[in-house]
């Protein structure tokens, strides 16, 4: 029998507002793990005699003839239910795993996103592993406080470039909760060295206030780099590292370590944002604009979305850090909720590589050599940089030919089944980028031609082309097809990498080259400029200050000037102004209703739209992120409203969802402020 551990944060008790009834024994009010909106409430179950049940424990119950997991939210001596109460069939966990803080956070997120509470709770809690639970509790001696810091800590010299550094550290060490958007200097976001580092300084400052810290990063490679940094500290704290590839055993063990206070710092990917750390003092989100920090499942919350609400509810510090500033982060600064911690502009430029953005005049000066994918003068710059060390070549897509078009009319090549974009391999075989179906007898939907041409070249073909241009230079490819490479040495080589797969060079790259910039910047989506700038600033952060970054394919003069000036703050300020004029996020709240056409059309006729909210229309959807459950004719309805009217709109949307669910009508998905509007 496992020992029962009773953390002090849970106390069962009667809800004073409930009226007694003729039920003897204790009653457990259970949140059942189902995402049906009309079942989004607590259900009363009888606690069998001799069974020890605490609030926050996971239990097994029966509902409508089926067995479900659920979480005990309250205990009561009575119930208002007039029928016969079913008993709890089994207690799944030996300890309460749903803390009041995480429950309050889940309630807040569920209300703000019009989704069932159980859906958020299920996302926040890992799957229980009996072996991990038994091993952990058997070795658990006692819940411990934050490990004291004994030695003095020397702060990194890189903070000298930040005028607000002293104020930030003083507040953290005093136990206060400053909120900041932190613009990183080159080399900070992907550190290859160990020893004194600004991330280490923040961790030490929080621990000195006798509080704990949560760090959320986009990828497992970032977790690995953070692990090396923390291990290099003079007094390494107790840390739990969480990666998406972790086994259930390891994931549940690290969860219990955070829950019961045996770790002081949690470092992990997206799911770590819900880590139930006690005495939490600060949350650090690295590169919050990275889409890998956004949950691909409804309600599609990003780590920053959750962190903002958690920082508000638990009154802890939040620091969103990145080479560029995302629109969501900029909105926090603009509203006054967070402060901007940025280096002096001249210091940033002095510590970063020079940026070149070739324009039409540069191409004309190269003559016929300027018409190619890589103009002649850019090739010369790369050849010179190779004498100094490795050169990073950044391409937007993996594969051979990532996008094809009709050779006759230039219409985009589309899959004959799902209408997704086509790609080609080195044998010129076509397949769909979305469903991967081969296109044996493809023809253009516009002119019926069967001839195609390449419009975007992937990493594999880029590596082959550059191998011919720079004969004798080793070529390394890092992408999801060829394998991801974490670090490289300083030897002369070309490194071809896709976004997010760039290896870290020991002493930084001698130069960087971004190809096919129009593939991202030229997309029709509203998020394209922000995403393009984020990717290219991350590339800039990997290059030595003495090097250079060349970005080929930028036709917009204002974006080109923002890159050349290396001023992310001015760039995101311009994007905020544009969103303000357009009336889109973050100036307004945008709510999307997705689903089958019939279901969405019925829904928008049933939902009540409050004042200062307006419908923007209904449009068909195509894309990789469209759910298959939305059928062959998926659509999206958009609503726009003022921020203070958004809670009322979400209440009406949730009420309509509950009503339709109770009548077994077709359901729709709700998404707040989607990155892709259509």
Image (cartoon, helix red, strand yellow):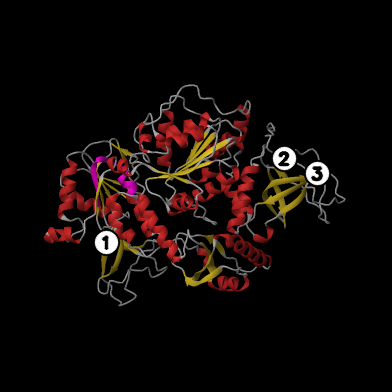
Q: Is residue 378 left or right of residue 286?
A: left
Residue 539 lies in magenta, yes or no?
yes
Q: Which residue is mark 3?
A: 26
Q: Residue at x 70, y 39 (%)?
A: 10
Seen in the picture, residue 1 relative to 84 is either above or below; the reply is: above
- Location of the N terminus by quadrant is top right
* Cα distance in 3D space between marks 2 and 1: 62 Å
| Visible residue check, residue 362 | yes
| Visible residue check, residue 238 | no
Task: Give whichever of discs 2 and 1 has the lower sequence position.
Answer: 2
Q: Would you identify the image quadrant in which residue 190 lies?
A: top left
Q: Which residue is mark 1?
A: 555
| Secondary element type, mark 3 | loop
Q: Residue at x 29, y 35 (%)?
A: 506
The residue nearer to you, when weighing 585 against 573, is 573
Residue 590 lies in magenta, yes or no?
no
Q: Is residue 46 left or right of residue 592?
A: right
- How many residues crowd mark 1 within 10 Å: few (<14), some (14–19), many (20+)? some
Task: Give whichever of discs 1 and 3 has the lower sequence position.
Answer: 3
| Boundaries of the magenta span | 537-550
């Amino acid at each position: 029998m496992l020992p029962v551990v009773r953390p002090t944060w849970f106390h069962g008790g009667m809800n004073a507002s409930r009226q007694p009834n003729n039920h003897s024994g204790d009653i457990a009010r259970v949140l059942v793990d189902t995402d049906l909106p009309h079942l989004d409430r607590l259900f009363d179950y009888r606690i069998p005699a001799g069974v020890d049940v605490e609030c926050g424990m996971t239990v097994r119950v029966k509902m409508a003839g089926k067995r479900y997991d659920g979480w005990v939210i309250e205990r009561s001596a009575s119930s208002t239910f007039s029928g016969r109460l079913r008993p709890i069939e089994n207690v799944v966990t030996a300890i309460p795993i749903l803390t009041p803080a995480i429950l309050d956070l889940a309630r807040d997120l569920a209300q703000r996103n019009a989704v069932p509470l159980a859906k958020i709770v299920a996302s926040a809690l890992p799957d229980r592993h009996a072996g991990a639970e038994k091993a952990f509790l058997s070795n658990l001696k006692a819940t411990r406080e934050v490990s004291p810091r004994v030695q003095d800590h020397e702060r990194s010299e890189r903070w000298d470039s930040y005028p607000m550094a002293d104020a930030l550290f003083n507040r953290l060490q005093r136990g206060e909760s400053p909120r900041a958007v932190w613009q990183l200097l080159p080399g900070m976001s992907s550190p290859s060295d160990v020893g004194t580092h600004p991330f280490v300084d923040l961790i030490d400052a929080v621990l000195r206030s006798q509080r704990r810290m949560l760090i959320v990063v986009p990828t497992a490679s970032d977790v690995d780099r953070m692990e090396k940094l923390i291990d290099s500290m003079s007094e390494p704290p107790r840390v739990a590292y969480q990666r998406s590839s972790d086994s259930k055993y390891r994931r549940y063990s690290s969860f219990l370590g955070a829950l019961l206070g045996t770790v002081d710092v949690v470092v992990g990917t997206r799911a770590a944002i819900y880590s139930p750390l006690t005495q939490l003092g600060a949350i650090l989100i690295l590169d919050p604009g990275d889409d890998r920090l956004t949950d691909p499942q409804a309600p599609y919350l990003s780590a920053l979305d959750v962190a903002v609400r958690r920082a508000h509810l638990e009154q802890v510090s939040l620091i969103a850090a990145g080479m560029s500033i995302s629109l969501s982060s900029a909105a926090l600064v603009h509203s006054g909720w967070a402060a901007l911690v940025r280096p002096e502009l001249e210091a940033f430029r002095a510590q970063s590589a020079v940026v070149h953005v070739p324009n039409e005049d540069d191409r004309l000066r190269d003559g016929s050599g300027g018409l190619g994918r890589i103009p002649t003068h850019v090739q010369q710059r790369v050849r010179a940089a190779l004498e100094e060390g490795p050169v990073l070549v950044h391409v937007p897509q993996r594969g051979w030919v990532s996008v094809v078009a009709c050779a006759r009319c230039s219409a985009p090549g589309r899959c004959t089944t799902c209408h997704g974009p086509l790609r080609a391999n080195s044998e010129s075989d076509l397949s769909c980028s979305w469903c991967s179906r081969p296109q044996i007898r493809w023809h253009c939907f516009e002119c019926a031609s069967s001839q195609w041409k390449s419009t975007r070249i992937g990493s594999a073909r880029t590596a082959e082309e550059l191998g011919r241009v720079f004969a004798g230079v080793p070529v390394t490819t890092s992408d999801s097809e060829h394998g991801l490479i974490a670090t490289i040495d300083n030897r002369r080589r070309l490194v071809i990498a896709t976004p997010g797969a760039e290896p870290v060079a020991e002493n930084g790259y001698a130069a960087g080259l971004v190809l096919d910039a129009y593939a991202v910047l030229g997309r029709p989506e509203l998020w394209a400029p922000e995403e393009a700038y984020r990717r290219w600033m991350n590339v800039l952060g990997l290059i030595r200050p003495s090097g250079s970054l060349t970005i080929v394919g930028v036709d917009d003069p204002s974006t080109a000037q923002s890159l050349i000036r290396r001023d992310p703050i001015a760039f995101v300020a311009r994007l905020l102004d544009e969103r303000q004029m357009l009336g889109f996020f973050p100036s307004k709240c945008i709510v999307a209703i997705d689903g089958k056409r019939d279901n969405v059309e019925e829904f928008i006729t049933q939902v009540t739209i409050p004042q200062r909210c307006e419908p923007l229309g209904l449009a068909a959807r195509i894309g990789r992120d469209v759910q298959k459950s939305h059928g062959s004719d998926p659509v999206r309805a958009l609503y726009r409203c003022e921020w203070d009217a958004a809670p009322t709109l979400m209440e009406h949307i949730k009420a309509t969802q509950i009503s339709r669910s109770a009548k077994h009508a077709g359901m729709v998905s709700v998404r707040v402020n989607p990155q892709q509007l259509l």
